[in-house]
Amino acid sequence: MKYGSATLVINEKVKSMWDKGENIYHLGFGESRFPVHPLMAKALADNVHQHSYVPLQGIPELRQKVSKFYNRQFQLNSDESQVIVGVGSKSLLYAVMHSLPGDVILPVPAWVSYKDQAELNGRRVITFDLDRANGFEVSIKALAKARRLAKPGPCMLVLTNPNNPTGTILSQDNVQKTAEYCRDNQIYILSDEIYSLLTHGGFQHTTPASFYPEGTIVLGGLSKILSLGGWRIGVAIVPKGLLGDNIIDGFRHIAGSIWSCVPAPIQYAAMTAYEGTSEIENFIFDCGSMHQIRTHYLYDQMCAMGIPCAAPQGAFYMYPNFNPWEDALKVKGIHSDYELGMHLLDNYEIAVLAGSEFMDDPQHYSVRLATSYIDAENEKAAISIVKAYKSNPDPHTFIQDHHPRLKALVQRLGEFISSVS
Ligand code: PLP
């Protein structure tokens, strides 16, 4: 058995194909590719001399900035004692699952690592389907059914909002109803909000912590909003009181035994991100807009081809399904979403991730498309994309003049649809 997150595996595969000179349109990996903001680069360079171990839970000054940032952005009422700084939000998710009791409930499609993390923690996973017909919202009825299947006593629900893989955002009303149901039914919410600042125009992110602060753990970080995935810094805001204290204890146990602390220079540099500097906040906003334009262009083209797909509302993902072509796919020997992904890669140079990697039914023929890599495959391309957007943010010009590969990809996708139509 080969372990490793499916997203990282496809990324390694595409990179080795690129190294061999092959042309691949890489929609398989959700890494925000925009360049490091100069203020972040300077902050890291200025702190390269910070070579001592720092506190396990994170540098107090950074934790204070993080709590103020979240209070300002999402109207929370946290303080620094509730903030934990981890090696990416993955480490925090793991520590939270380790520290809380009970089964783990996952709405499907579910981001690739949740199930592995639950299993590594010896937790039983219970799933329920998000409401596809209704923008992938949480059906309280389906959640209640999953709750009945879980062991009595407290358990956990992981909510991803904005969602990976669907790119949709839960409405405020749905978040509120879900939070209230969880409060009444002994369910803690692990609220994965890593994409919370990458909402598309008009869509607002709501955190369940505003309705259920005593039972919600908010997870975030800099990987997506500032394209700093490789810096490996994530943050969690835990509830005040005993629940939060238990999570912090659990985290201290794990971090103290395995990695000690997030590298000190990274933590010092992260203060610049959480300080609330308008230059950084504007950059985050621009990155969200660029993701939006790129993702919506592909969405519009897919709609024109008749490919069913929920409209993207945040992050840089879409989750189309190719069910309408099921018969033709079967004639070609394609019997699952995985085989569809392989077919797209082998015949159309398009890398995607099959929906079954997100615990979905392979017969739905759903795949996840991430637009973050396209036309930003290397540092030079990524820098020129940002430059182009700054000089003219008009969506039409931005796509037509600066996204040759995105347009070529659309053509390849069209050729595939013709081949099955
Ligand atoms: N949560 C979701 C939904 C993600 O898509 C990712 C990264 O792809 C993560 C968490 C992990 O992010 P980090 O880099 O903070 O560990």
Image (cartoon, rainbow, N blue to C red):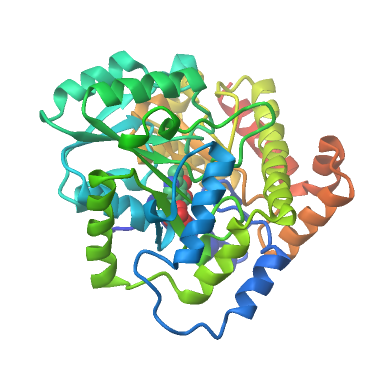
For the question of whether residue 137 can be seen, the reply is: no
Q: Quadrant of the C terminus?
A: top right
Q: Nearer the viewer, residue 287 or 167?
A: 287
Left or right: where does residue 375 sit relative to residue 169?
right
In the picture, residue 127 is in which quadrant? top left
Residue at 72% over, 67% down: 38
Question: Exactly how many numbered labels are in the figure?
Answer: 0
Above or below 187: residue 115: below
Left or right: where does residue 264 sit relative to residue 127?
right
In the picture, residue 87 is in which quadrant? bottom left
Residue at 49% over, 58% down: 64
Q: Nearer the viewer, residue 315 or 345?
A: 315
For the question of whether residue 260 can be seen, the reply is: yes
Residue at 46% over, 40% down: 77
Q: Nearer the viewer, residue 79 or 332?
A: 79
Left or right: where does residue 165 sit relative to residue 242?
right
Position of residue 113 measured from the top left corner of the image (x, y, whole percent):
34, 48
